[in-house]
Image: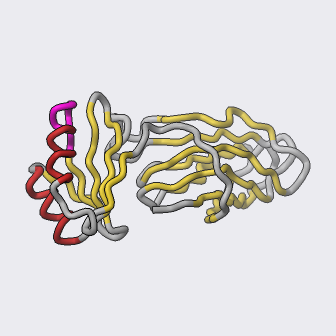
Amino acid sequence: MIFQLEELTDFKNKVEKLKLIVTTVPQGDGWLGLATNGALTFSLALPNQTALDMFNAELDNIDEELVQKTVVEPFASKGDNHFRGTGVEGVAPYGGVADIDLEVAYNVCRYNGIEILNGDYGDEVVLRILDDANGTYSGTPNQVLDVFGINWKMKKELIQILPYEATLYKGMVICVQYKNNTNADKTIYVNHYLHEVL
């Protein structure tokens, strides 16, 4: 759960009291300050460079043992291959489309792509990364941040691996849109390769 704060002093107090990990991420023309312990997350809008400078100066006064401060780079593809994964599934109706989504539950994680099981030859997949429902990272709710597969044709193999390397943040959605071109409903299984979670 994310709690939006209005004042920098309130944000700093939460960080000190709860010993939170602090990150900043780009948001529109400014930034967003995030503080979390994994269960709770507090956010503070930083609309311009002056607000970011004040934010950094205020947090620099906190004992380093009480807070781990990191700066998150803008959304971009990255590479590394230590495996941790999670799986989801969905039913694609015959001749229809199913969205099989996974919302990122970690504050920060690396992503290496997906493995699709039980697909059929000639079926199609569209793979996208979406902003969260609040538009935390782009300023627009559910905004498409990246597309890493457009009408990807499934092969004859039951398992197909689609590589994609990126750094993802909490609330982003990995959207797998599966088009079933056969004449029967089918259950599609999707394994996501996540690692270096925070």
Q: Nearer the viewer, residue 111 or 176?
A: 111
Q: Is residue 115 left or right of residue 65?
A: right
Which residue is the extreme one toward the top? 29
Task: Identify the residue at horizontal 14%, vertical 50% (top origin).
Answer: 58
- Look at the image and tell me whether residue 96 can be seen: no
Q: Nearer the viewer, residue 140 or 44?
A: 44
Percent x, y of residue 66: 25, 68
Q: Is residue 190 left or right of residue 155?
A: left
Above or below, 118 relative to 154: below
Task: Identify the residue at horizontal 68%, vertical 60% (top origin).
Answer: 191
Above or below, 43 relative to 89: above
In the rendered view, how is the structure colored?
secondary structure
Task: Identify the residue at horizontal 28%, vertical 28% (top origin).
Answer: 29
Quadrant of the image containing the N terminus: bottom left
Q: Nearer the viewer, residue 158 or 99?
A: 158
Percent x, y of residue 87: 64, 64
Q: Is residue 67 left or right of residue 12?
A: right
Quadrant of the image containing the C terminus: bottom left
Number of numbered discs visible in the structure rendering = 0
Q: Nearer the viewer, residue 8 or 91?
A: 8
Percent x, y of residue 178: 68, 46
Say whether residue 46 is magenta. Answer: yes
- Look at the image and tell me whether residue 189 can be seen: yes
Quadrant in which residue 22 is drawn: bottom left
Which residue is the extreme one toward the right? 156
Percent x, y of residue 121: 87, 45
Say whether residue 196 is magenta. Answer: no
Residues rendered magenta in the picture: 45-51
Above or below, 15 relative to 57: below
